[in-house]
Amino acid sequence: MANKRLRPSGTWEYTIKRAKLLPKPLSLTFQTEEEGDAYVARLEQLLDAGIVPQDVVEQRDGIATTSDAIRAYLRRVSVPDSDVQVLNALLGRLKEKALTAIDYAWAERWVAGMKRQDHLSPSTIRHYVGALARCFDWVVRSGTPMLAVNPLRLLPKRYATYTGEDRIAVEAQDVEAREDVHRDRRPDVAEEAEIRRIMAGGKPTGRERAFELPYRPALVFLFELAIESAMRMREMYTLDVDQFDVGRRTAGLERTKNGSKRSVPLTSVAVAAYERYVDAVTGLDPEMHGFSFDCGRLFPWVDDMEASMRAENMPLLRQKVLARVTSRLSGQFGRIFSAAGCSDLVFHDLRHEATSRFFERTTLSDIQIAKITGHTDPKVLMRYANLRGSDLAARLW
């Protein structure tokens, strides 16, 4: 049994002696007796089984709190960019907590707080919980006695949806409860044609002149590639030239949102759009502002943004560069869509459209379509498959 004592500072000190397992007595300090008892109980269970966690033996790089866990996870594990962003945000949002105090009650309180105090949307809550759950999975697998079970994996289905009690608590603050809304916006034929006309240099209705679109051929190709391949915006504009294989009609993605590789097959329409774009670049189209494929990139925006940030003496952090490129492109397409009469359309809706077309126009199975789109959760994939009711009706007798 460990010896414990209350120190003058108000903290609790525990001393564990296991001559056959520990090279020297282990001294640990905790803010509360409850946290200390919980930690030591878990540690002694492992020691009784002859298991000595490496972090405990070395007594360095210890993972004792939620912040410790997140930082260690980001440092030691290859984490997808999407999780990096979410976990870095949690470092600022999540109140520091000892891992010994992380249990199911804490998980429920955290989720309730995100609804009733922060008024976050259900999708944002799922992003936060999912990223932290994957971090905690790693902590549990690492063998530290600080966290024996991941309580986030015990949350019930629809945990992010606002319950009746959540609504009462939120509405008492004169705030409207957030709905769990899944986008199902798809451009119709007329909208799609108008978008293409404006991108080709046509004058939008109600305007005296056409839009000035920097790198217009690249924007047109990005639009066509998105609506034909279901690739995400960042997956496309970070492509290198050698990742686009016209002979095999594939685009090889090295690092996706989910952190995995995938090969995206290309339709004949996407290949034709690529060939037109290549002709514009190699033909020194003035609208491409001197961009060439010599840099190795398929699109100009990343290098262009890096040059802009370098001129402002800003550090070229990859996440900052990509975030700025995404923001710039989203803004450009937002203006184009608005001028085309579909201001509620966003670029990511093109991924919805492309995925739905795979269901409507091919005989590919759900698994095959998921291989193309990169979805790992069948439920998420089905949310993208927003089949038009009229198309389904046409197949009936």
Image (cartoon, helix red, strand yellow):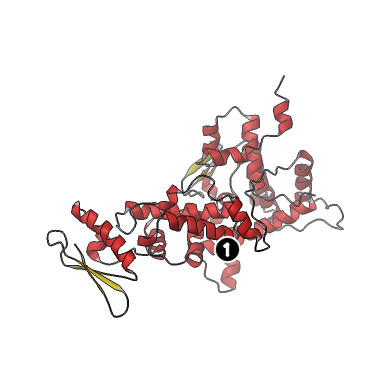
User: The residue tagged with tag 1: helix, strand or loop?
Assistant: loop
Q: Is residue 370 visible?
A: yes
Kind of residue sitting beneath label 1: Gln
| Residue 172: image location, x then y, percent | 65, 61
Q: Residue most toward the left?
A: 20
Instruction: Report the label total.
Output: 1
| Residue 344: image location, x then y, percent | 73, 51
User: Depth check: 205 or 13 in front?
Assistant: 13
User: Depth check: 289 or 115 in front?
Assistant: 115
Q: Is residue 147 left or right of residue 206?
A: left
| Residue 293: image location, x then y, percent | 58, 53
Quickly name the residue at label 1: 117
Q: Residue most toward the top?
A: 397
Residue for point 62% across, 36% down: 267
User: Depth check: 130 or 259 in front?
Assistant: 130
User: Depth check: 347 or 126 in front?
Assistant: 126
Q: Quadrant of the N terminus?
A: bottom left
Q: Residue most toward the bottom?
A: 8
| Residue 357: image location, x then y, percent | 65, 35
Q: Is residue 79 visible?
A: no
Label 1 crowd (10 A; few <14 / some 14-19 / many >=20): few
Q: Quadrant of the C terminus?
A: top right
Is the residue 304 above or below the residue 354 in the image? below
